[in-house]
Amino acid sequence: MPEPRINHRISARELRVIGPQGENLGVLTLSEAIRAASEHQLDLIEISPSATPPVARIADFGKWLYEENKKQKASKKPRSSEVKTVQVKLGTGDHDLMLKAKSASKWLTEGNRVRVDLFLPGRSKYMDEKFLKERIERMLQLISVDYKIADPARKSPKGMSCLIERA
């Protein structure tokens, strides 16, 4: 962000001026605006130089710059979304599936992604893939929030997994 022009560095003849409490002071000449800023013992800061007429604000420049930097840093932070895991087995009962679906729903509303793992020990890894996908579908039907499948069900080293996220 380029350094904003303040006080006598402003080149426009007329400015739309915003007061220290955010009130609109109207369109003033540069000298009137600087005089109004000095009466409040504050700076005249050119906020929007491309507007017609340019917009300036009466504020403490150091405080204003601090607030602007704070806003920029907040907007740059990436939204952290974790991948939470729900593990089910072939013989997992209906009540346990409901509890796991409730946890998955909560995580989805918090903005996290959820991996549904169907754990397959030993020989059960070689079962019919259609049957295994139906087991995962059984779990997904119990989730109460809207979701979309980010990564469809596929074989994984421990069995089969599927990744879902908030729709």
Image (cartoon, grey):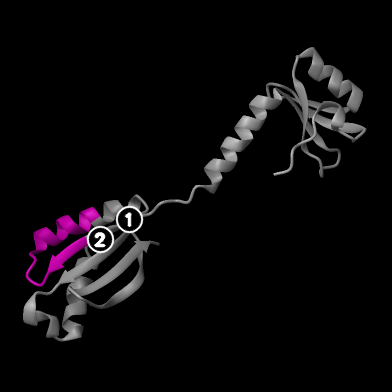
Image location (x, y in percent) of residue 39: 80, 13
Query: Residue 137 or 74: which is nearer the viewer?
Result: 74
Q: Is residue 64 magenta?
A: no
Residue pointed to by mark 2? 143
Image location (x, y in percent) of residue 124: 9, 80
Residue shown at 31%/68% (left/top)?
A: 163
Query: Residue 159 or 103: which is nearer the viewer?
Result: 159
Sequence-wise, which precedes: disc 1 or disc 2? 1
Asked if disc 1 and disc 2 are in contact, CB closer than 8 Å, the reply is yes
> Distance from label 1 to label 2 (Cα)?
9 Å
Residue shown at 55%/42% (left/top)?
A: 73
Residue range of the region highlighted in magenta in the rendering: 86-103
For residue 92, which quarter of the picture?
Answer: bottom left
The secondary structure type at the circle numbered 1 is helix
Task: Indicate the quadrant containing the N terminus: top left, top right, bottom left or bottom right.
Answer: top right
The secondary structure type at the circle numbered 2 is loop
Residue pointed to by mark 1? 108
| Of labels 1 and 2, the one closer to you | 1
Q: Is residue 33 rendered to the left or right of residue 96? A: right
Relative vertical location of residue 63 with respect to residue 47 in this rendering, above or below: above
Residue shown at 38%/54% (left/top)?
A: 81
Q: Is residue 100 magenta?
A: yes
Mark 2 crowd level (few <14, some 14–19, many ≥20, 10 Å Cα):
many
